[in-house]
């Protein structure tokens, strides 16, 4: 079936409410979100049946003369009439025009149908004319029926028909069921409602005017204003022409369905949009809150532990490379500080480390920092938004330890490069060690010669010091001095290595904070404002 143009902004409203439902899910009351989702589905279904037909429903209480009015408008005796007890157990439909209304009536759940055409032109009433083409007139069961299934049918159809004609009578127009259950919830649907005060022939003009004025006052109390209220009589025909013209004007304009759907969308969006009224702009995570967050995450990630390990490893490797050759083996058998933490000096593939878990105090600092960042981001937003922003920050808390650990494991600590001077010092240490050994061997040989009382070989002197002694003492002293000097240089370099490692680790922690905390906070704020903007589009007058 052809889908006609819905109007200038219905498509925009429907798209806005769909987007709002997506964003509101989990943020706003589930009942209101479900209602808006149902309205969106209903709009699609109704438009799927096209706008060739306009569904007009006569709704009223027992004894209001609703069925008599239905028969009078259709010109046919289709609904049974009774003065006191309810007689409309099923919804009756009368259809004008050649277009097939079967699928639409199937969707409405209306089984009893009649085509308002007669082979005898003389049998046609004034209502059966070209202007009525596309009219589907329904006679609903009584909304105050004692049968629960009748009331359910009324509730279902009142929620979906294109135009509602409320048939009232002078005795029951102030019925609390009518006003509390139907009219107040439909206050935003005044463009798709008409009111017919039936049985006006039983009143004199003054009483009729008084009833109409009182009814208008009651409707204003319900929030229903600027609606047509007609005094009619199904029995005498009073006001039927005016009611007929009002109905056919809506049918000819093909706007009743669009107006109803627009009102449905606006009403559903309006219920969701209450927290968005006077919504100020949100705040932002300032430098102080960001700094506290990064400090807390750095503590939880063990940045200080890792940087200390980088410094220790550098000193240990320097001692192993430049230390006294006869004692450096003791340095080499010590465990590697980074390897003990399952860290690599040049960064890993993102696997886990063996850093100790964060302490309770560190976890508490992270929680406080997350709440502080969320509160700063929420700014002056009214409830329920601050709690939602805080939830967005706290949702990341469970994953933060794992993310931080992976970030530390994957960070290039800048500790893999071995300085060139280590090789030079190592060569010098070997030369000094060789010198010391040569002196020691020489002295041992001299001692053996003396022990055996053999003639000692000539021993050159350097000044007053024998050369073997000078080689032994000089090689040992120079090697120890060079080892000590190298240790001092390595200690200074280890601090620089630790500074580089700390800077890179903090950058990795900041990336985790951005990805897991700050970006979700910004996204939550953007979603909140987009949600409210979508609801404003859907609910605008």
Image (cartoon, rainbow, N blue to C red):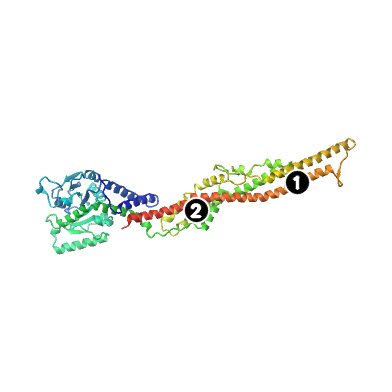
Q: Which quadrant of the figure contains the C terminus?
A: bottom left
Q: Residues within 10 Å of mark 2 (few under 14, many from 20)?
A: many
Determine which quarter of the picture holds residue 273: bottom left
Badge 2 marks a residue whose secondary structure is helix
* Residue 515 relative to residue 138: left or right: right
The reply to whether residue 170 is in sight is no
Q: Nearer the viewer, residue 247 or 391?
A: 247
| Residue at point 44%, 60% (across, down) | 380
* Residue 523 relative to residue 478: left or right: left
| Residue at point 68%, 41% (across, down) | 332
The reply to whether residue 474 is in sight is yes
In the image, residue 139 sits, relative to residue 224, either above or below, namely: above
The mark total stands at 2
Query: What residue is shown with label 1?
Result: 480
Query: What residue is shown with label 2?
Result: 370
Residue 357, percent across and down? Answer: 56, 46
Tag in front: 1 or 2: 1
* Residue 456 relative to residue 13: left or right: right
In the image, residue 229 sits, relative to residue 157, either above or below, namely: below
Ranked by sequence position, the earlier of labels 1 and 2 is: 2
| Residue at point 78%, 41% (across, down) | 435
Residue 31, percent across and down? Answer: 34, 50
Q: CA distance from mark 1 to mark 2?
A: 53 Å
Q: Nearer the viewer, residue 148 or 310?
A: 310
Q: Nearer the viewer, residue 363 or 412?
A: 412
Q: Residues within 10 Å of mark 1 (few under 14, many from 20)?
A: some
Residue 7, percent across and down? Answer: 28, 53
Badge 1 marks a residue whose secondary structure is helix
Residue 158, percent across and down? Answer: 25, 51
């Amino acid at each position: 079936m052809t889908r006609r143009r819905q109007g200038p902004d219905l498509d925009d409203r429907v798209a806005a409410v769909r987007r709002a439902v997506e964003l509101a899910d989990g943020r706003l009351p589930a009942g209101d979100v479900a209602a808006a989702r149902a309205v969106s589905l209903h709009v699609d279904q109704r438009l799927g049946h096209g706008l060739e037909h306009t569904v007009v429903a006569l709704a009223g209480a027992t004894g209001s003369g609703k069925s008599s009015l239905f028969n009078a408008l259709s010109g046919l005796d289709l609904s049974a009439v009774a003065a006191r007890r309810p007689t409309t157990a099923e919804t009756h439909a009368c259809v004008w025009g050649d277009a097939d209304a079967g699928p639409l009536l199937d969707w409405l759940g209306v089984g009893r149908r009649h085509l308002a055409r007669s082979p005898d032109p003389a049998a046609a009433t004034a209502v059966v004319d070209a202007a009525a083409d596309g009219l589907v007139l329904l006679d609903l069961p009584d909304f105050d029926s004692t049968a629960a299934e009748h009331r359910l049918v009324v509730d279902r159809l009142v929620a979906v028909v294109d135009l509602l004609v409320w048939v009232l009578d002078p005795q029951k127009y102030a019925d609390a069921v009518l006003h509390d259950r139907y009219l107040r919830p439909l206050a935003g649907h005044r463009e798709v409602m008409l009111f017919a005060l039936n049985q006006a022939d039983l009143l004199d003009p003054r009483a009729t005017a008084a009833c109409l004025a009182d009814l208008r006052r009651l409707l204003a109390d319900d929030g229903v204003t600027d609606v047509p209220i007609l005094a009619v009589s199904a029995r005498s025909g009073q006001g039927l022409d005016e009611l007929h013209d009002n109905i056919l004007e809506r049918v000819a304009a093909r706007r009743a369905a669009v107006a109803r759907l627009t009102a449905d969308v606006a009403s559903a969006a309006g219920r969701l949009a209450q927290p968005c009224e006077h919504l100020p702009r949100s705040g932002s995570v300032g430098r102080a809150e960001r700094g506290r967050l990064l400090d807390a995450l750095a503590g939880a990630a063990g940045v200080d532990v890792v940087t200390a390990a980088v410094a220790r490893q550098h000193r240990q490797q320097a001692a192993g490379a430049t230390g006294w050759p006869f004692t450096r083996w003791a340095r080499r058998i010590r465990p590697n500080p980074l390897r003990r933490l399952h860290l690599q000096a040049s960064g890993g593939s993102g696997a886990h480390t063996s850093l100790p878990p964060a302490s309770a105090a560190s976890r508490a600092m992270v929680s406080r920092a997350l709440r502080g960042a969320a509160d700063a981001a929420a700014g002056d937003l009214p409830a329920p938004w601050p709690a939602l922003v805080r939830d967005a920050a706290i949702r990341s808390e469970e994953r933060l330890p794992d993310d931080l650990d992976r970030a530390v494991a994957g960070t290039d600590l800048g500790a893999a490069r071995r300085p060139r001077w280590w090789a030079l010092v190592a060569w010098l240490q070997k030369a000094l060690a060789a010198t010391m050994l040569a002196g020691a061997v020489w002295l041992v040989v001299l001692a053996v010669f003396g022990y055996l009382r053999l003639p000692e070989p000539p021993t050159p002197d350097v000044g007053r010091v024998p050369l073997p002694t000078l080689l032994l003492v000089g090689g040992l002293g120079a090697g120890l001095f060079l080892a000590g000097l190298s240790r001092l240089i390595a200690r200074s370099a280890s601090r620089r290595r630790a500074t580089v490692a700390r800077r890179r680790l903090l950058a990795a922690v900041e990336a985790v904070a951005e990805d897991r905390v700050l970006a979700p906070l910004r996204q939550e704020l953007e979603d909140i404002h987009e949600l409210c903007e979508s609801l404003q589009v859907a609910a605008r007058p």
